[in-house]
Image (cartoon, rainbow, N blue to C red):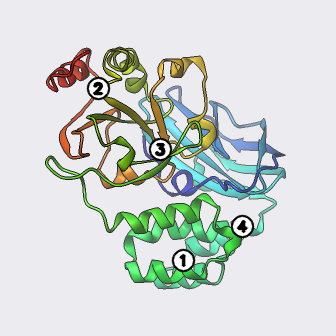
Amino acid sequence: MKFSFFLGAFLVISHLTFSQQVTLHFQLDGRLKNNEFYLINLGGKNFQATDLTTKTIESEINEIAQISILKLNNKGKILGEKGFWLVPGSYTITGTSEPFTLTIDPITEYQQLQDQLTNATSIASKIQLIEANLDNIVALANLNVLSEQLEKETIETLLEKIPTSMHLSQSYLQLESDLLKRDYSIASKGTLFTNFELESKTGEIITLENLKGKPTLVEFTFTGCAGCVKVLPELKEIYDQYHNQLNLVSIYSDKRKSDFENNNPVYKKELVTWTSLWDPTNFVSDVNKVTIYPTFIILDSDGVVIDRFTGGLSGKVKRKITQLNLTP
């Protein structure tokens, strides 16, 4: 499920580490139908509710966070959404069961900037507002949303003006990554795989060069991917049988490092004894147009793509690896 601006634009501010409490008092008029519910995302944490006429939600957030309130039906279709930028404190949210009617009190300075950007009638006027507020995470988040509509030179110019105090923010890193992606094309069969530098769970930086010397099975995944969890026992079997002749690498597109490092038993990460890499900006997956998880790419010993396939039907990955004629 992909959400639009409010949930999609929020990027965790990685250099802000001190959590503080935020309290949300909902006072909405009207009730949902039996097949509808609210999904509330607050600073990366999800809350689900069917009645917000009188409800209080408390959570810990960093210095700045965004709340996204979505109304969905049981099939996952988004029926409405509204978002607000928050700082720690207490807020009252009023309106009806239709998210577009929602208002929040008090309104933070970050939300005031978001309202100005939302109401700006042209891309040029939005960019003017963004350029005047490049030290504000809201401006950078909106620049991320607009980046695909901008010329490369425009983004480069704006990046140079962003103060160094913002360079550790996920929004800035995403902008750098999106800019770099424009110089890369999808790694198709017979071409060298995307060159990358990604961090492993042990903190080691792994590159494509590190994988050369023997074939590699690359898995594109993310924490919480049901199909990816289902295929883990098969990957474990492959790794145990061929690890001397085959690299196995799982690339996680988790936005938050806490998700990448999450070892909740439901994710079965105890099975993952091979190399796991964190790609928080989706650099490698976006360059290679990965939209289905899990997606697998097989490389030869020189890092050249020899096969690509999706899904994890039982035995499918093993059959592909068998074609490499490796010796257990």
Q: Quadrant of residue 315?
A: top left
- The earlier-in-sequence mark between 1 and 2 is 1
Report the Cα–Cα distance between label 1 and label 4.
Answer: 20 Å
Q: Which disc, if any, is residue 110?
A: 4
Q: Which disc, if any, is residue 159?
A: 1
Q: Which disc, if any, is residue 79?
A: 3
In this view of the protein, which residue sits in the foreground, 211 or 62? 211
- The earlier-in-sequence mark between 4 and 3 is 3
> Three-letter amino acid code at disc 2?
Gln
Is residue 11 among what the camera can see?
Answer: yes
Please state which of the two labelled residues, at mark 3 or mark 2, is closer to the viewer: 2
In this view of the protein, which residue sits in the foreground, 170 or 87? 170
Judge from the rendering whether residue 264 lies leftward or rightward of residue 187; answer left or right: right
The quarter of the rendered structure image containing the C terminus is top left
Please state which of the two labelled residues, at mark 4 or mark 3, is closer to the viewer: 4
Task: For mark 2, give the secondary structure.
Answer: loop
Judge from the rendering whether residue 116 lies leftward or rightward of residue 190; answer left or right: right
Q: Which disc, if any, is residue 245?
A: 2
Q: Position of residue 287 (x, y in %)?
A: 32, 55
- The earlier-in-sequence mark between 3 and 2 is 3
> Three-letter amino acid code at disc 4?
Tyr
Q: Position of residue 149 (x, y in %)?
A: 38, 73
